[in-house]
Image: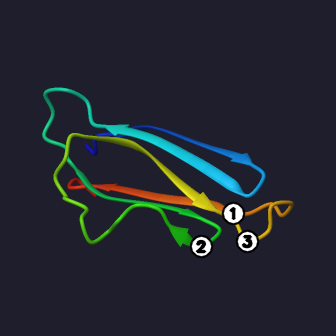
Amino acid sequence: MVTAIRYQIRCEKDGSSVRASYDLQVPDGGSALIASFSLKVDGKELIDQGHWIPGQVRFNGTQFTQLSEANKDVTVAFSISSNEG
């Protein structure tokens, strides 16, 4: 059975500034690990994939980005996977 990764992602827009906060974790005592995490705002990756370390049990933080057009709505997309699938 695949273990669910619990997550909370919140994006807030203030003019052209975007604040994205995230908190991912696997249940205590299980064998599941976070294998990958991607968070994009308007197509821009906010998680530094070059420094991402697979195999974590918890990953949280806050990232900031600037939009080219302050009055435009943009897409937020994310992807999470575990070592279990």
Based on the displayed image, in which of its 4 quarters is residue 44 positioned?
Answer: bottom right
Q: Is residue 18 left or right of residue 70?
A: left
State if disc 2 and disc 1 touch (CB < 8 Å): yes
Q: Which amino acid, by three-letter code, is at mark 2?
A: Gly
Three-letter amino acid code at the position of disc 1: Thr
* Residue in the foreground of this view, choosing between 8 and 4: 8
In the image, residue 48 lies at what x, y percent? Answer: 35, 65
Q: What's under tag 3, amino acid-wise? A: Ser
Tell me which corner region of the image, top left, top right, bottom left or bottom right, holds residue 3: top left
Q: Residue at x 73, y 71 (%)?
A: 68
Q: Which residue is mark 3?
A: 68
Label 3 element class: loop
Of tags 3 and 1, the one toward the viewer is 3
The Cα atoms of the two marked residues, 1 and 2, are separated by 7 Å
Q: Residue at x 40, y 61 (%)?
A: 47
Q: Where 58 falls versus 65 (above or below)?
A: above
Q: Quadrant of the C terminus?
A: bottom left
Q: Is residue 29 left or right of residue 64?
A: left
Q: Which residue is mark 2?
A: 43
The answer to which of 26 and 20 lies nearer the viewer is: 20
Q: Is residue 7 above or below residue 85?
A: above
Which residue is under mark 1? 75
